[in-house]
Image (spheres, rainbow, N blue to C red):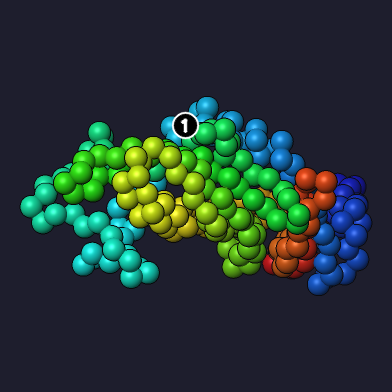
Amino acid sequence: MNRLKKVSVICLAVFLFGVSAFGQRTEISIALSEHFFDTVMDAVFQYSPPPRLPLAGNFAPFGLASDGSPAFLKAAYADRDPTDAVCDESIRLQRENSGIRTSVRFREGQILAPLAFSGNYNPPLIGCIDFAGWAESRVDLVFDEAGQRLVANATVNGVHLNGTGGVGSSLIARMVQNSIDRRINPIEIIKLDKISLMLPLQNSSNIRMKAVGISHQIHNEVLVIRIAYEFQKV
């Protein structure tokens, strides 16, 4: 009797997922609204210090930036501790700055993420410069099949600065852009094995769900993620 009940439960689960044979696929949809991401951001900034990204290492040696333009260099005689709490040469993401809130927005089929920040930089002979502003960024979703993850890559399209007093503003903007591009990515969104099933079979083997593809679309300011799963015997 127990064996019959166990087999019945397995059959019901398979039926609910619309699968009638091994190798066939089914799909799970997840809808994420802008309000959901706003709530996540509120929780992040409420329960932890602002995320911090170091600026150090974002400029090339010998007085030139990566694009060939002049860049500040640390003086050879300067003995500065880059972890100095007073001027630690970093940017800190903020919930809001200059009327711009760190958020996720869905516009014209794109995922946009304005990022508010503040920070400081310590060029030689000048001293610590405080700055603030916000960055325009676009987010692309990537399916990591090997790692069974959905990850996001943020690309900064523009940086808006205030508070530098005109000192090195273009250089600082590039450093901010590089820090965000290089140190935030990739962002893990979903571990796909956490929303899969493992079904026991009668012969001591199992059926598992493995993610094999992802697509997404934006509709009415809601991101709909469709995850294609394949049932495999293991």
The answer to whether 233 appears left or right of 38 in the picture is: right
Q: Position of residue 79 (x, y in %)?
A: 11, 47
The answer to whether 82 appears left or right of 234 in the picture is: left
Residue found at the far top of this picture: 46
Q: Position of residue 208 (x, y in %)?
A: 73, 61
In the depicted structure, whether residue 153 falls above or below residue 114: below
In the depicted structure, whether residue 202 falls above or below residue 55: below
The answer to whether 149 appears left or right of 18 in the picture is: left
**Residue 73 appearing in the image:** yes
Quadrant housing residue 225: bottom right
Q: Crowding near pointer 1: few (<14 within 10 Å), some, many (20+)?
A: few
Q: Position of residue 147 (x, y in %)?
A: 58, 63
In the rendered image, which residue does mark 1 sit on? 48
In front of the other: 32 or 82:
82
Residue at image position (35%, 45%) is 166
In the depicted structure, whether residue 24 falls above or below residue 7: below
Residue at image position (64%, 44%) is 104
The three-letter code of the residue at mark 1 reads Ser
Q: Quadrant of the C terminus?
A: bottom right
In front of the other: 5 or 199:
199
Number of labels in the image equals: 1
Label 1 sits on a secondary structure element that is loop
Residue found at the far left of this picture: 77
